Image: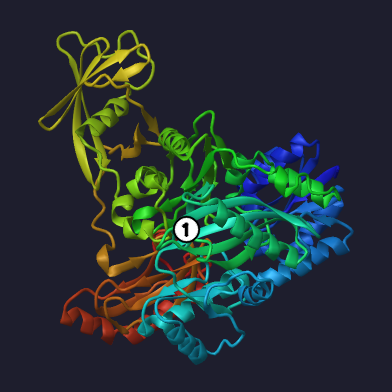
Amino acid sequence: MFRRILIANRGEIACRIIRTARALGVETVAVFSEADAGALHVAQADLAVPIGGPLPAESYLRGDAIVEAARATGAQAIHPGYGFLSENPDFVEAVEKAGLTFIGPSAEAIRAMGLKDAAKTLMQEAGVPVVPGCHGGNQDDEYLARAAEEIGWPVLIKAVAGGGGKGMRLVERAADFAEALASARSEAAGAFGNDSVLIEKYIDKPRHIEVQVFGDGTRAVHLFERDCSLQRRHQKVIEEAPAPGMSDDMRAAMGAAAVRAAEAIGYRGAGTVEFIVDAADGLRSDRFWFMEMNTRLQVEHPVTEAVTGVDLVEWQLRVAAGEPLPLSQDDLRLKGHAFEARLYAEDVAQGFLPATGRLEHLLFPEGVRVDTGVRAGDSVTPFYDPMIAKIIVHGASRPVALSRLRAALEATEVVGTRTNLAFLRRLARDPQFRRGDVDTGLIGRNRETLSAAPAADDAIRAQAALVAAGLGGEPQAQQGFALWRPLERRIRLSGSGADFEARILCPQAGRAVVRIGAMECVFRRGPDGWRGPDGARIDARLIGGRAVVFAGDVFEFPLVDPLRVSTGAGSGADVIEAPMPGLVRTVFVQPGDAVAAGDRLAVLEAMKMEHVLRAERAGAVAEVLVAEGAQIEAGAALIRLAPEGPEEAEAAAAGAVAGRGRAAGADAGSSAPGGGGGRGA
């Protein structure tokens, strides 16, 4: 076994590898960017080495710096985690050239599966069924458009070097193909440095089922399947093992196909063979097709660990150190059911856009496995994937495990950034999901219901007012006492886009009355805190200038300063603002241009994904306030449209020449992150 390893990654996967390494008595070396100097994985490792700036290209993608850090600290091997350099064959070769061990597959195996088109050809030769589509090397636009027509709409455009939904577009009609192809290529080039794509038939009721494999370079075993069908934006949200509705015959067929795939390339270490399954007639052994093989540990590996009792990271270390596979296929058994929910910092209502912010409060339930790389007080930055944690539960059966998942999500608390926590709670209660009737379109079909913002009723607002008045802590002897009449205090809070006033009275010790308009809510304090009119204990706290109520969902009410004076209406609907921090990849318009509703104005790249900003109305472009290549903050003003009305639009167009000169000068001369002005620059 190794004495010391370096982990070429960050966040929750680095912390998860450290946990197993420590259990085996193996020392760990962390690497970190400037943005991660105070990160949890840095604090947990035995040694830590800085490797560059906050952008991945300046740090976690610098293979030379990582190899040098390993040599300088005496590490014998490098574990890549997932993402970043984990599937880069050139990095594998650099590691081995330096006399170190790469904890993962060979460079040849990664290359064999690294490009989806070549991998599908290889799998066909190995007798593994593949999805109908265009997997060849011809990248001519017209050729791909004709291929899509021949395959039949709808089709999927997929980056050949991709994963995680990046460089993937669903196209349902010929008229949309050219724009989708250009967008997929641009996103693939930015994420993987390769803009090649393939075209596949889109399955009407698809299930995404993958098989965990593990090889020693000669032979391989499978550790059963995971169902990853619950996806948004082609990215997984909740995974489970085993797949609901899976028969023994189909499990055997998929497992055998996955093992053939692994052994065909002499696979070593942990890998995942992903299949698309047509579930229109239930799960059938003749209705699954190979999609791709991920030549690394997967984000969702904990559910496999839960149902097999296997520590996959331990297996990775042992096999990389030259030991044989710890168990044979006959030794592996399924035990119970497991779920994993991915908690992200993201704005669900805005199409799951990534979010940033400081985690002012973070609490997870006891007795549940939580893989995370952050703590309360840490910040979610725009530089990396916005995952906060993975919440993993296990039970003797699917209903038991699902009940535990719902309870764990209800007990999780996050304050300080927008998250998908309320969305996950609704998803875990969805009737179709509870039945196990899942497919990759479930979230899309129910998006409006699942994404609805939690509504705060008067009882929730009353709880917020109670804690905002300073009554949430330990009671004081004279608290609420007034000489002549009960003390009354007025509190102004903001919620659901409007301010409201609450009056709080304390007529006697241990009793508080909150009035909001005509509503009155009476609270009584017991030994364990305040309880509402129905006797239920309330959970409300004052966090960062906000009254926060935890009642199934998280409700936040900023305190309104009574001396606050309105500063005006702001930019209004005429200004297109950045919905998240990111990089301005492309700007399509100039001052004076006429645009129609739905026209593309700019492309913003954030957390490895591209987001197209479109005009909400027709009009003329008055100003372009940002330059291509600028790194901007959320809320930064990007483009201003002329006010509606013919006279105003004509005036804006007449001043376009002067406007172009001013905008260009500001963009070229500014060193601010906004690159030319705008709120948040």
Question: Does dot 1 land on a helix, a strand or a loop?
Answer: loop
Mark yes or no: residue 108 visible. yes
Q: Is residue 251 left or right of residue 33?
A: left
Mark yes or no: residue 87 visible. no
User: For residue 162, which quarter of the picture?
Assistant: bottom right
- From this viewpoint, which residue is outermost toward the right? 99
- Crowdedness near tag 1: few (<14), some (14–19) or many (≥20) residues, C-alpha within 10 Å: some
- From this viewpoint, which residue is outermost toward the front? 249
Residue 524 position, x and y percent, is: 26, 15
Quadrant containing the N terminus in the rendered view: top right
Quadrant containing the C terminus in the rendered view: bottom left
Residue 512 position, x and y percent, is: 23, 18
Q: Nearer the viewer, residue 228 or 283?
A: 283
**Above or below, 135 relative to 271:** below
State how the image is colored. Answer: rainbow
Give the mark count: 1
Residue 337 position, x and y percent, is: 53, 40
Q: Nearer the viewer, residue 17 or 674?
A: 17
Residue 676 position, x and y percent, is: 45, 70
User: For residue 372, which quarter of the picture?
Assistant: top right
Residue occupying the point 62% across, 74% down: 120
Three-letter amino acid code at the position of disc 1: Leu
**Above or below, 8 relative to 470:** below
**Above or below, 32 relative to 658:** above
The residue at which mark 1 appears reads as: 283
Q: Nearer the viewer, residue 73 or 139?
A: 139
